[in-house]
Amino acid sequence: DQQVKQNSPSLSVQEGRISILNCDYTNSMFDYFLWYKKYPAEGPTFLISISSIKDKNEDGRFTVFLNKSAKHLSLHIVPSQPGDSAVYFCAASSNDYKLSFGAGTTVTVRA
Amino acid sequence: DAGVIQSPRHEVTEMGQEVTLRCKPISGHDYLFWYRQTMMRGLELLIYFNNNVPIDDSGMPEDRFSAKMPNASFSTLKIQPSEPRDSAVYFCASSFFGGSSYNEQFFGPGTRLTVL
């Protein structure tokens, strides 16, 4: 039972433009959300997180938005750079130290 | 600082053989997690430890899988006997929660297991 869903398996964007990645969740107990980035042959690396008490968190080119009523979050990357080409995973936690991951979205940034 | 270290990076074995995957967490971290990544199921949590004690092993697929953490700097995930459907990338991750249950987890590079 997939509690975290990333319905877009891939995204292609031109360098310099905005990348928007979406994530939906079904478990209303989730109250902490993270995005991870993964390059081939490497482990996922933490990118940005947001607590359910906020609706936006920004870190440089990366911004995460949370819409609790819709059980939806999104990651915005502005501007997109070639080094951003990777797989992005959405993850969620419910105060039990465990993370539930989405299936991932492969982002390709075109020069 | 060294991150999470996993060995081997690649393992190819034959069905029925015992496989042992190893993990060294980041020093000072008090939680250790084992994940498995497959095309069909994505990244799924198998088991996690707190201060070397297994807390939740509900994700372990079956009795063929076992995990131990004999000390704060070492953990193993063992599959005996291995089957072709165990082929996947296995990740170890560690974290320090410091009294809060919310924090990022640091992942190792993974072990790619192929069971023939």
Image (spheres, rainbow, N blue to C red):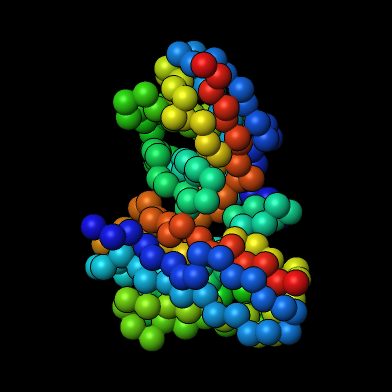
Residue A52 seen from this side:
yes
Residue A93 seen from this side:
no
Classify B72 as above or below B25: below
Q: Is residue A15 left or right of residue B105?
A: right
Q: Give the quadrant of the C terminus of chain B.
A: bottom right
For the image shown, how many numbered marks are present on the structure? 0
Residue closer to the observer: A111 or A5? A111
Q: Is residue A100 left or right of residue A33?
A: right
Residue closer to the observer: A28 or B28? B28
Where does the image place residue A18, in percent across and percent down from the top left? 49, 16
Q: Is residue A47 left or right of residue A103?
A: left
> Residue at left 61%, top 57%?
B37
Q: Hey, which quadrant is residue B61 in on the image? A: bottom right
Where does the image place residue B6, in percent across and percent down from the top left? 44, 67
Where does the image place residue B16, in percent across and percent down from the top left? 73, 84
Q: Give the quadrant of the N terminus of chain B.
A: bottom left
Where does the image place residue A85, in percent across and percent down from the top left? 51, 31
> Residue at left 42%, top 71%?
B23
Residue closer to the observer: A8 or B18? B18
Classify B6 as above or below B55: above
> Residue at left 37%, top 24%?
A61
Classify A87 as above or below B104: above
Residue closer to the observer: B10 or B75? B10
> Residue at left 64%, top 71%?
B12
Q: Hey, which quadrant is residue B2 in on the image? A: bottom left
